[in-house]
Image (cartoon, coloured by chain):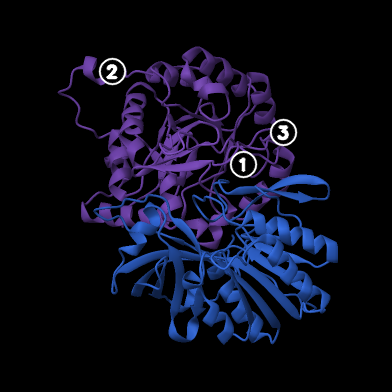
Chain colours: A blue, B purple
Amino acid sequence: MKQFDKSVGVSSSANGEAFEVETRVKSNDEVNGEYRLLILDAPQKVLDCQPGQFFHLLCPVTSQNAPYLRRPMSIYGFYPEKSELHFLYKVTGEGTRALAELLPGDTFNVLGPLGKGYSIRDDWQQLLLVARGVGLATLAPLAQEAQRRGRKLTAICSARSPEVLMSVELFREMGAEVITVTDAEGSSGMENIKAIIQDKIGAGEVDALYTCGSNRMLTLLQEIGAEHGIPGEIALEQQMACGLGMCQCCVRSFRRNNQIVHERVCREGPVFDMQEAMGW
Amino acid sequence: MVDLTTKLGTITLKNPIMPASGTFSEDLAGVIDMNALGAHVTKTITYEKRGGNPTPRVCEVRGSMLNSIGIPSKGINHFIQNVVPYYRDYDVPLVVSISAHNADDFARICEAITVPGVDAIEINISCPNIEDNGKAFAMRPSSTQQVMTKLRGASDLPLWAKLSPNTGETVEVALAAQEAGADALVVSNTLLSMAIDIQSRKPKLGNLMGGLSGPSLKPISLRMAYQCAKVVDIPVIGCGGISTVEDVVEYLIAGASAVQVGTATFINPTAMPNIISGLEAYMTKHGIADLSELIGSVRDDDAADAVVFMETAP
């Protein structure tokens, strides 16, 4: 007779376990005009996370908002030493509107940690990440892990304007070289980002590329990666229902061995090989 | 000490709670104790590989959800080699859900899946996502009878027919399934539905239409479970919108011998084990020693038959 099965094959989450737990809201404040930072007091068992993993959040039903399904959200920070779990989010729909109504002291049900996170192979000594807007939240734990493992990290952070650039200080604190590009300054175009990355590659400073979310960034990094033979990983988003792999809702297409295969973002991902990922 | 066991023909379940097909897989073992469940019901498989529908495959509506997943399937060989052995290690009956486009293909997979380790076969004759415009065998008594008769000849395992709410002939379809040799009825699948984004004016599902599930489906499925339990002699398994102990008790009173929990697991993966312990506590509190005290105990004596069997629009 099988016991409580804590290791479900190769694609299970970091520690092979996910938990549905009640957390307590410590704070939920605006950090600039566009984003909010939710800090939760969470039990230790859900804080054994990998960069790139996500939680499935049961956003509260309020008098104004009634989200039904959980909302997947990538981890912005996890700090077992202070029992904290951080999420950085932008209010865009009913789920995040409800999330913004959480007050300190409220209980909040989360499921996780879920999915397969970013990998940092032993021979990837110099890492380069590119992200825009709230996508930087997804990559923040990677910067922390790079620092922990003594890897060199360059972070290209993109945003509409310097005022809404997120996480620049956080990345600098983690020892990253930060290059900012913004629409307002006219520096966030794909051609400029490409030139910056190719300079770094020319100087022999890039062993692996990381990004998340954006289709345009995927296309650019695939092209650069293929041209220079540099591997990379991308965290993808997709609408989810269960978040555990049961419902088959969150599939995306991938190119593998000259075939197109479908994989679940929640289970085989959310982090995938850069070259296998297909634009959308 | 209360007795949670329930009998479905030749199969005895340790409790009446099992997952609804399509809302359960090995992946749940990372979150709950799979041995706690009354049965394991796997997502519908087809004989051949299938890709499933275009995304988005799910959207939410007020307090419920729509899906048009479309039965992506790795095919029966993969299932027999990988999935059946996985569940063999649990002390829980395994129910495999199958589907096909026509009666002959249905019989072929029914025969092929009759292997050691499988305890019952759920016949998905009601998926709104597999045929054009949501058509399914279980919409009509004649097509139900035809396919179930073929399947009865293809396997000696208990056959559970999963009925559809997309019919105006619930009672006739239930009787046809029983007549053709079904061992139990699962009542029911999702209700064909639609949602449109008013900004883009595009349907919210990639497949345009899909099945409604969640709390808003419950009164409809409960009505059907009641109607079916009234007329058939085989067990009825309630399914549709169950997320609390009270929902389970309501279905049992309506005449269901067991229930399936589906969409609730997407919201709370611990829903099923919580409902099982909650049901035990409920029975203890109310002095109910045995599920048979609840099953079919609805007090409907005063209602006229004409009201009870009034048909809804399809």
* Residue mark closest to the camera, 3 vs 2: 3
Name the quadrant of the C terminus of chain B: top left
Q: Are marks 2 and 1 on the same chain?
A: yes
Q: Position of residue A74 (x, y in %)?
A: 52, 65
Q: Which residue is drawn at 63% across and 19% down?
A: B103
| Residue that mark 1 sits on | B118
Q: In this view, does A44 lie to the left or right of A279?
A: left
Q: Please, which residue is most extreme toward the left here?
A: B302
| Residue that mark 3 sits on | B48
For disc 2, the chain is B
For marks 2 and 1 on the same chain, the one whose residue lies earlier in the sequence: 1
- The residue tagged with tag 1: helix, strand or loop? loop
Is B243 situated above or below A6? above
Q: Please, which residue is most extreme toward the top here?
A: B142
- Would residue A59 be seen by someone viewing this image from the given angle? no
- In 3D space, how far apart are the residues under numbered discs 3 and 1 (Cα atoms)? 19 Å
**Crowd band around label 1 with a 10 angstrom C-alpha radius: few (<14), some (14–19), many (20+):** some
Q: Do labels 3 and 2 share a chain?
A: yes
| Residue that mark 2 sits on | B309
Q: Disc 1 residue type?
A: Val
- The residue tagged with tag 2: helix, strand or loop? loop
**Crowd band around label 2 with a 10 angstrom C-alpha radius: few (<14), some (14–19), many (20+):** few
Q: Disc 2 residue type?
A: Phe
